[in-house]
Image (cartoon, rainbow, N blue to C red):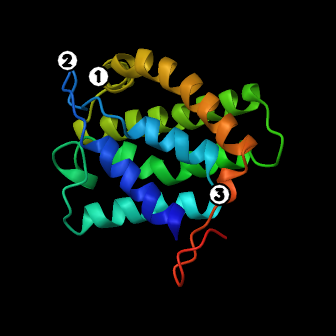
Amino acid sequence: MFWVIGGCGLIALGASVRIYLPGTVVPLTLQSLALLLLGLSGPLVPVVAATLFYVALGVVGLPFFAGPGGLFGETGGYLLSFAPAVWLMGWMSGGSGVSYVRLLFAGLAGMGLVFIVGSAWLVLVYNSDLTLAFSAGVAPFLAKAALEVPLAAGIARQVRSRGLSRVEIDGMNGEMA
């Protein structure tokens, strides 16, 4: 439960940081860093559940989503990619003694999936071509992703090496399990 609620909160916190760049309808946020940290650090099922919980809370009206229109607006494709991207990162980086390089590739794969689904959604929503969707929904964010992926991989390596990715909080008595 710790990873579900904490992960959802981390994504929501990342969404609260919004910078609108010229030439794009998708805001720059820290959601992708939150997804990377969860996907590379946390236990697979709870962190996927955290992303689904985040999207569900946004759909029912909590002000979580970064862009206008929520799940059906321009950021809908990115939101729909969260759970599959976190699952992919967790699956690729699963196991103990995971190297930084493996975490790096898992993070790149997860971010690639977010960019692919987000761009495809922009093509559908705006009835545009892929070039326009790439220039508005991917290109402005590549430099940020190039910084976030290695940063998250390094943090995840430290979290995993300390065994913190398996930490759960027992809801009954508050003790670490």
Give the mark nearest the N terminus, 1 or 3.
3
Q: Residue at x 20, y 30 (%)?
A: 25
Which one is in front, 169 or 119? 169
Q: Residue at x 53, y 37 (%)?
A: 113
Please indicate whether residue 33 sits to the left or right of residue 27 in the image: right
Residue at the outermost bottom position: 172
Q: Residue at x 44, y 59 (%)?
A: 6
Q: Secondary structure at mark 1?
A: helix
Q: Give the residue type that dot 2 points to.
A: Gly
Say if 140 sits above or below 35 in the image.
Answer: above
Residue with the mark numbered 1? 136
Q: Give the residue type that dot 3 points to.
A: Leu
Please indicate whether residue 85 sits to the left or right of residue 44 in the image: left
Residue with the mark numbered 2? 23
Give the percent coordinates (x, y) of residue 26: 25, 32
Give the mark nearest the N terminus, 2 or 3.
2
Give the percent coordinates (x, y) of residue 19: 21, 27
Q: Secondary structure at mark 2?
A: loop
Q: Give the residue type that dot 1 points to.
A: Ala
Give the percent coordinates (x, y) of residue 146: 50, 18
Label 2 to label 3, Cα distance in Å? 36 Å
User: Crowding at label 2, few (<14), some or many (≥20) Cα neighbours within 10 Å?
Assistant: few
For residue 117, which numbered disc appears in the image? none
Label 1 to label 2, Cα distance in Å? 6 Å
User: Crowding at label 3, few (<14), some or many (≥20) Cα neighbours within 10 Å?
Assistant: many
- Count of picture labels: 3
Circles 1 and 3, Cβ within 8 Å, touching? The answer is no
Say if 16 sits above or below 83 in the image.
Answer: above
Say if 133 sits above or below 54 in the image.
Answer: above
Q: Quadrant of residue 117?
A: top left
Q: Secondary structure at mark 3?
A: helix
Please indicate whether residue 4 sits to the left or right of residue 8 in the image: right
